[in-house]
């Protein structure tokens, strides 16, 4: 894959969350200085939860006019919005509600509906709100220990329709359906930030950043914004096997 524009290595999980939260504030500030609204896709997981806690607290909370931010989702589990596994629920409880974000500012993936129909609806909503070729301002992603990102898992990437911006697919290793933004949607973004922390991700991170391009084996390799910025935020444990 192409060398990422920036890989920032932080000493531990706390520093990783701080760096990622500061990056969110910087990107949104830059966008809102130029346009009325900023569009950001949220992620699930433990690091996004920690980042959210920093964003809702001072001083970062006061640096953004959150009424001008529109929230999307990078992926979602096929569960109701109040389910403990819902990415929407985690972000609502830790970010959206504390910031008093209105319902009209949030476009959630409807995990309680038929996955294929819900993903098709999300694709339509993205095109309606952002144009025929949707371009998000910031996409927040994580990376799993096997190299997945969003709900793009090993073995699921090769067959994705390049003309779609949101899809649903069955993930065999989870024995579950997931909804996700596609590589086309992610790589159209103006900014993409990927976080990865923990020693269990060291092998995959090395393969993704320094190995041969195998996007269906290491889906995070597919993230390469066509006309945008890509930033990796990783801790020392995850970066321990990087050679350069």
Image (cartoon, grey):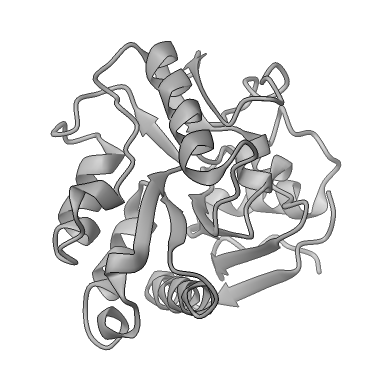
Picture quarter with the C terminus: bottom right
Q: Is residue 237 left or right of residue 13?
A: right
Q: Position of residue 186 (x, y in %)?
A: 61, 44
The residue furthest bottom is 59
Which residue does the image show at 49% across and 60% down from the upper left?
Answer: 197
Q: Position of residue 163 (x, y in %)?
A: 69, 25
Total tally of numbered discs in the picture: 0
Q: Which quarter of the picture shows residue 227?
A: bottom right
Q: Is residue 192 above or below residue 86?
A: below
Does residue 174 appear anywhere in the picture? no
Along the line of sight, the residue nearer the viewer: 154 or 109: 109
Which residue does the image show at 40% across and 46% down from the upper left?
Answer: 72
Q: Position of residue 235 (x, y in %)?
A: 53, 69
Which residue does the image show at 64% across and 60% down from the upper left?
Answer: 190
Q: Is residue 51 left or right of residue 237?
A: left
Which residue does the image show at 29% across and 24% down from the upper left?
Answer: 111
Q: Is residue 146 left or right of residue 65?
A: right
Q: Is residue 145 above or below residue 153?
A: below
Q: Position of residue 33 (x, y in %)?
A: 50, 80
Q: Is residue 111 above or below residue 172?
A: below
Along the line of sight, the residue nearer the viewer: 153 or 127: 127
Does residue 154 appear anywhere in the picture? yes
């Amino acid at each position: 894959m192409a060398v990422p524009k920036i890989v920032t290595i932080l000493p531990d999980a706390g520093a990783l969350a701080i760096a990622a939260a500061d990056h969110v504030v910087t990107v949104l500030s830059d966008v809102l200085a130029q346009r009325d609204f900023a569009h950001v896709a949220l992620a699930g997981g433990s690091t996004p939860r920690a980042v959210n806690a920093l964003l809702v607290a001072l001083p970062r909370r006061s640096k953004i006019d959150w009424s001008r931010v529109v929230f999307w989702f990078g992926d979602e589990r096929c569960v109701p919005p109040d389910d403990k596994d819902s990415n929407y629920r985690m972000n609502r409880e830790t970010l959206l509600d504390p910031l008093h974000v209105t319902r009209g500012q949030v476009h959630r993936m409807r995990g309680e509906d038929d996955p294929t129909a819900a993903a098709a609806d999300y694709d339509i909503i993205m095109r309606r709100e952002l144009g025929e070729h949707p371009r998000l301002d910031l996409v927040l992603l994580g990376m799993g220990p096997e190299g997945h990102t969003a709900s793009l898992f090993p073995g699921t990437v090769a067959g994705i329709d390049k003309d779609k911006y949101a899809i649903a697919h069955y993930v065999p290793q989870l024995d579950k359906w997931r909804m996700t933004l596609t590589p086309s949607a992610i790589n159209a973004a103006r900014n993409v930030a990927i976080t990865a922390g923990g020693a269990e991700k060291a092998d995959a991170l090395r393969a993704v950043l320094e190995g041969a391009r195998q996007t269906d084996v290491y889906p995070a390799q597919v993230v390469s914004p066509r006309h945008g910025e890509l930033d990796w935020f990783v801790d020392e444990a995850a970066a321990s096997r990087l050679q350069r």
